[in-house]
Image (tube, coloured by chain):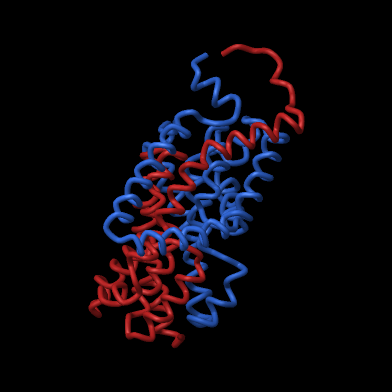
Chain colours: A red, B blue
Amino acid sequence: MKGGSPPPKPTLAQAIRKAGRQLMSVLPILTGVILLVGLLRVAVPASTIKAVFSGAMLRDTVFGSLLGSVLAGNPINSYVIGSQLLEDGVSLYAVGAFVVAWVTVGMVQLPAESIALGRRFALYRNGLAFAMSIPIALITASVVALLGGV
Amino acid sequence: MTGEQQGRKQGGSPTMLRNGLIFLGIVACVYAAVAIFAPATATTALMASLTVFKNVVLPLCLVFLALVLTNLFLRPHQVAKMLGRGSGIRGSALALGAGIASTGPVYAWYPLLGSVRRQGGGAAQISVFMFGRAIKPFLLPAMVAYFGLVFTVVLNLLIAIGAFAVGWITEKLPVHDDIG
């Protein structure tokens, strides 16, 4: 490794230009993801979402995670859909998993995440987040059942 | 120095730009197919995308500001010290706090996270940041209203613990040298 003095501190103009280039390099990915999210919102109506839950605790929790992984958008939307699912008789286990996976796992964003942060990283991270959403939901719903909530 | 290295030094990543354009092209083909077979669906989807896009503008401005500040004040060795593989629990706690404080969709943060990784930020800390984003302080009242106080407290506590667990496992995985 070569020694020597560190590179000079960039000026504000250089920092702005570099930030602009960094942002520009990710714009095509961003546009693609936004277009996919829009398509998904139209392609998967709420009635389809409700139909996948059967009432079995573990199966519904996994389905909740899967659904949250596929859908994307503002987290408040996951609360609205989640509360609607609860009203329709879907378990809190499934809804908890759905809410956690909604933010932490992104199947739609996976290609973009792979490009921006590395393919292996994106695959492992999403897999881990998906797996983690299940025990989080199971423990949360169990504690709520014990203490009496919702 | 290769063109790619030169481009990276100048800020953007040519690989990311090229792959991003390919990805956008594929999405455009999907839209074209939908437009042929179901024009109304394609139009509604485009309108929905426009709504999503409006929600991304503000976070993107914040990301741009954060990028300028990190370019100005942070040197790679500092990033590595604060958020690198050797930053330990303090680095993970910092990443969790940043994740909780971050707003907007996660993809708006990719440029900053990619920049942090290239400057020596650890994969584990990026994982903690991304998992911690599930905790939304400004949405907690809404969560309480929809699901109750017990659910909200327990879920968010477990998400924080889960973020550290995900980071710890990520550290053990072969993900440290796969960024382009």
Give the answer, above or below, for where B3 lies relative to B95.
above
Q: Which residue occupies 76% across, 29% down?
A: A11
Residue A130, image x and y in percent? 36, 58
Residue B85 in view in this figure:
no
Give the answer, above or below, for where B66 lies relative to A131.
above
A86 vs A40, nearest the viewer: A40
Residue A16 in view in this figure:
yes
B5 vs A60, nearest the viewer: B5
A34 left or right, relative to B120: left
Q: How many marks?
A: 0
Based on the displayed image, in which of its 4 quarters is residue A10 positioned? top right
B100 left or right, relative to A123: right
A119 left or right, relative to B90: left
Q: Which residue occupies 43% across, 80% down?
A: A83
Residue A65, image x and y in percent? 34, 65
Q: Which residue occupies 65% across, 34% down?
A: B78
Give the answer, above or below, for where B99 lies relative to B146.
above
Residue A94, image x and y in percent? 34, 73
Residue A66, image x and y in percent? 31, 63
A29 vs A3, nearest the viewer: A29
Based on the displayed image, in which of its 4 quarters is residue A6 positioned? top right
B90 vs B150, nearest the viewer: B150
